[in-house]
Image (tube, helix red, strand yellow):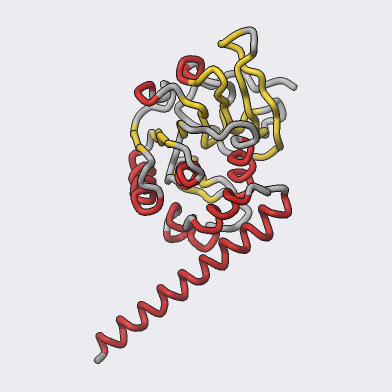
């Protein structure tokens, strides 16, 4: 009888937790995203659905939907929801990316978002512990995502060319591998270091006169930790 009672209590607790996280997802969308010009209906639907709390440690689950970067360890974070939403929404302002490479995919949240929005996603992560969490998350919620564990500074040539190369962290410049692995009309999206020491969300396309030069559009100011494992150069000067 005691065993039955314990099992029932556990089920009730799990159900209550699930309901709490579902409510937190809705509050995230309604209080953080929609008032900040996140208007893409499919993106909002996906972010109401994906269980972001499964991408963080047990001790961080209570802040999984807060308006903050959630620490993942090793100087990595799960980006605050609004940062992710702004960057992802920018990728769909012209053509929807069909083939996307996520650099520093960490625990898989953004990779899963792109998969639910119709992209074929390659998730590249250097940290095997984070990649293990991301692979498990995507097996459950975005099984079409292809995972690879390895260095970030070379991209992932086997699945190139990409319509989108997306960086899950702040970079100081667009890495050289983007030149060869990006479609001619593809875009590079992420956060770029500024001279002030902060960062700006950006979207970049090849210059019409040179495949090696990228024209950048800056979207918003914010902060993500530098993405380790990529060449560091001097901050961009405005």
Q: Quadrant of residue 185?
A: top right
Percent x, y of residue 72: 46, 47
Give the vertical position of 9 relative to 105 (above or below).
Answer: below
Give the vertical position of 50 relative to 226 (above or below).
Answer: below
Quadrant in the picture for the N terminus: bottom left
Percent x, y of residue 166: 52, 32
Q: Residue at x 54, y 17 (%)?
A: 184
Q: Residue at x 56, y 55 (%)?
A: 45
Which of the pair 197/5 is nearer the observer? 5
Q: How many marks?
A: 0
Give the vertical position of 222 relative to 233 (above or below).
Answer: below
Q: Residue at x 72, y 50 (%)?
A: 36
Which of the pair 227/213 is nearer the observer? 213
Quadrant in the picture for the C terminus: top right
Percent x, y of residue 178: 50, 20
Which of the pair 4/121 is nearer the observer? 121
Percent x, y of residue 113: 50, 46
Q: Quadrant of residue 156?
A: top left
Q: Residue furthest top?
A: 209
Q: Residue at x 72, y 48 (%)?
A: 37
């Amino acid at each position: 009888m005691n065993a039955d009672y314990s099992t029932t209590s556990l089920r009730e607790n799990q159900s209550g937790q699930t309901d709490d996280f579902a409510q937190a997802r809705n509050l995230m969308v309604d209080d953080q995203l929609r008032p900040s010009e996140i208007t893409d209906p499919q993106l909002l639907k996906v972010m109401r659905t994906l269980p972001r709390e499964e991408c963080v440690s047990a001790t961080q689950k209570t802040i999984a939907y807060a308006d903050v970067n959630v620490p993942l360890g090793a100087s990595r974070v799960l980006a605050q929801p609004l940062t992710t939403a702004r960057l992802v929404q920018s990728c769909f302002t012209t053509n929807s990316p069909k083939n996307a490479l996520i650099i520093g995919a960490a625990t898989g949240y953004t990779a899963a978002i792109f998969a639910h929005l119709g992209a074929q996603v390659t998730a590249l992560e250097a940290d095997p512990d984070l990649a293990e969490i991301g692979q498990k998350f995507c097996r459950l919620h975005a099984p079409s995502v292809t995972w690879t564990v390895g260095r970030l500074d070379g991209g992932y040539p086997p699945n190139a060319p990409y319509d989108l190369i997306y960086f899950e962290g702040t970079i100081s410049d667009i890495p050289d591998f983007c030149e060869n692995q990006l479609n001619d009309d593809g875009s590079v999206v992420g956060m770029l270091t500024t001279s002030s020491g902060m960062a700006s969300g950006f979207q970049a396309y090849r210059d019409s006169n040179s495949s090696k030069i990228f024209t950048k559009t800056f979207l918003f100011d914010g902060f993500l930790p530098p993405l380790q494992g990529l060449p560091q150069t001097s901050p961009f000067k405005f």
